[in-house]
Image (spheres, rainbow, N blue to C red):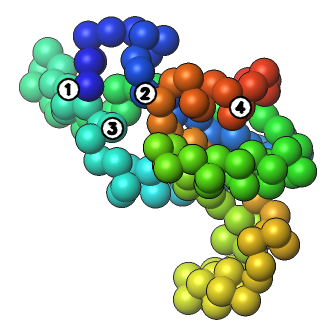
Amino acid sequence: MRTDLSTRQAKLKWVIVMDADLPAGRQANAAACIAAGVGRHRPQLLGADAEDADGYRHPGLPWAGCSILAADTATLSALRAKAAEKADVLVVDMPENAQNVRVYDQYLEQIAGTKAADLTYCAVSLLGPRNRVDKLVGKLPLLR
């Protein structure tokens, strides 16, 4: 972990690939939920807390940064499947089911009863070696 380098120089890369057709509110929700999942599995991604000149603490943020990319639903599904085969890439996804229920246990039940190939994703996050993640996301555009 080198917090003194540009995120472009970091050997670790984090991206969230978002369904470009989702409304902005659902995109923001998916990004926030996925970021929480990444933080749970890779707490070392968070840098040290910052303190401003008045002594107020600002909790640490991801030192590697995070690019938010856009894709269609078919590309998201293919990307998730391909990334899941890479042992050195953490995949955190948000199936559409997660935004369609209000009770987490119901979400768990729905996922348990759905084959992986039948899931539709709002977003997929990849965290891993820069070269591996770059190869997976190719030339996907930034989300606009």
Q: Where does the C terminus fall, quadrant-wise?
A: top right
In the structure shown, which secondary structural element does the residue marked by tag 2 occupy?
strand
Which residue extends farthest left?
A: 55
Sequence order check, earlier mark of 2 and 3: 2
**How many numbered discs sit on the rendered protein?**
4
Sequence order check, earlier mark of 4 and 3: 3
- Residue 130 is tagged as none
Q: How far is the residue under mark 2 from the one under mark 4?
A: 14 Å
Q: Is residue 127 above or below residue 93?
A: above
Q: Is residue 8 above or below residue 72?
A: above
Q: Amino acid at mark 4?
A: Val
> Is the residue under label 3 in contact with that under label 4 (CB below 8 Å)?
no
Q: Amino acid at mark 2?
A: Leu
Q: Quick check: 73 left or right of 47?
A: right
In the structure shown, which secondary structural element does the residue marked by tag 1 occupy?
strand
Q: Nearer the viewer, residue 32 or 131?
A: 131
Q: How far is the residue under mark 1 from the one under mark 4?
A: 32 Å
Q: Amino acid at mark 3?
A: Leu
- Residue 45 is tagged as 3
The residue under label 4 is 137
Residue 35 in sight: no
Quadrant of the image occupied by residue 75: top right
Q: Residues within 10 Å of mark 3 (few under 14, many from 20)?
A: many
Q: Residues within 10 Å of mark 2 (few under 14, many from 20)?
A: many
In the image, which is nearer the foreground, mark 4 or mark 3? Answer: 4
Q: Position of residue 60 (x, y in %)?
A: 27, 34
Q: Quick check: 6 left or right of 24?
A: left
Sequence order check, earlier mark of 2 and 4: 2
Q: Position of residue 77 (x, y in %)?
A: 80, 54
